[in-house]
Amino acid sequence: MSSKPYSPTPSSRLEQDREELTAIVERLTPTEGVHVTAWPALTLFRADSAGVPTCAMYEPSLGLALQGAKQILLGQHRFVHEPASYMVTSVDVPVSAQVMQASAEQPCLCLTFRLDLQRIRDMLPEVALARAAAVSSPGLSFSALEDSLLDPLLRLARLLEAPKDLAVLGPLIEHELLYRLLTGEQGIKLAQIATSGSQSHQVSRAIDWLRRHFDEPLRIEALAGRVNMSASSLHHHFRAITAMSPLQYQKQLRLHEARRLLLAGQCDVATAAHRVGYESPSQFSREYSRHFGAPPLRDVARLRWEDAGSAA
């Protein structure tokens, strides 16, 4: 009686690959925090305990939670990032993120792959995409994880400890990964962001302008004109993608940059406020406290204490 070689079912294959990738990420993150890797687009994250909400700027990326869970707030939208799903961020969005499940025995482990929208744009002619209505969708969303997407991520992670192989095979695997992403559930959204002339692409251009000119006064009519939209259309589609208005988005950019300046020790509070576009230091301090939960100097002192504790 002959027997066929064992072939894992799709569900068991997905679980096996996820367990192997989790083990690799845990081995490559001996301490808490964000870890860069030998492949610049790929970063790893580890937390050994649940934490408090922290404000961050998510750039276009593919995110995978391998163990534990995070809560992510974008505007009024609440998401839970856990191992059964993957996250796609299609534009730069300011969020509040909090590790919800983590312990020293089972740390929260995450993987982030930064997306190059120009590469995605270049790949569109070779990818068959389903037609979809030209509507603006949230800049951060989740889909069920499939092995077709997990497999190239696992193969790329395996190569992190083999630099010579990574240099040759990495670009091929990255191309495959982007192809799998474009042909998956999130592909239409990424294609719309990357396609010139689409409303999503116009909003992404407005976001790019705000990122580069956040310290300047904002006139919605002028910004809308720059991206060939009416002011009302820009406001509507901008909110649909980022869950906030252009003015609210600019404010968060200013506060994030001020926090970076203060953490770097480059200036005092009043100077930081002025550099990011505030005319009133007192207004800056009020909005900073409202956003980050503490006045500037107290917030920065807390962050430095936490960084020192993580490094110890």
Image: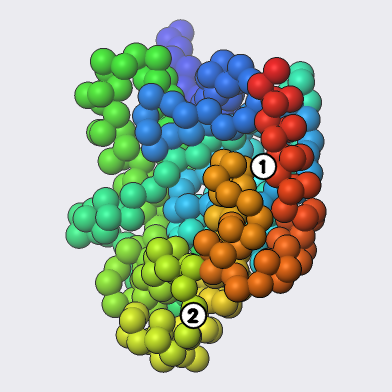
Q: Amino acid at mark 2?
A: Leu
> 36 or 132: which is nearer to us?
36
Q: Quadrant of residue 198?
A: bottom left
Who's the residue at 52% across and 84% down the image? 235
Where's residue 167, x and y in %?
25, 23
**Labels 2 & 1 near each other (Cβ < 8 A):** no
Q: Residue at x 45, y 78 (%)?
A: 135
The amino acid pointed to by label 1 is: Glu
The answer to whether 116 appears left or right of 307 in the picture is left
- Which quadrant of the rendered structure holds the C terminus? top right
Q: Secondary structure at mark 1?
A: loop
Residue 218 is tagged as 2
Q: How many marks?
A: 2
> Which residue is at the far top?
1
In whole angstroms, how far apart are the C-alphas of marks 2 and 1?
37 Å
Q: Look at the image and tell me whether residue 259 can be seen.
A: no
Q: Position of residue 147 (x, y in %)?
A: 47, 37
Q: From where the camera sits, is residue 129 visible? A: yes
Instruction: Quickly name the residue at label 1.
Output: 82
- Locate residue 161 relative to residue 170 in the image: left or right: right
In the rendered view, tell whether residue 253 sits above or below residue 312: below
- Residue at 52% of width from left, 61% of height from top? 275
How far across and down, in percent of the image, does residue 229 sit? 38, 87
Q: Residues within 10 Å of mark 1 (few under 14, many from 20)?
A: many
- Left or right, 35 with respect to 269, comes to left
Task: Relative to 182, say whether 76 is above or below.
Answer: below
Q: Nearer the viewer, mark 2 or mark 1?
A: 2
- Using the rendered view, name the quadrant where residue 74 is placed: bottom right
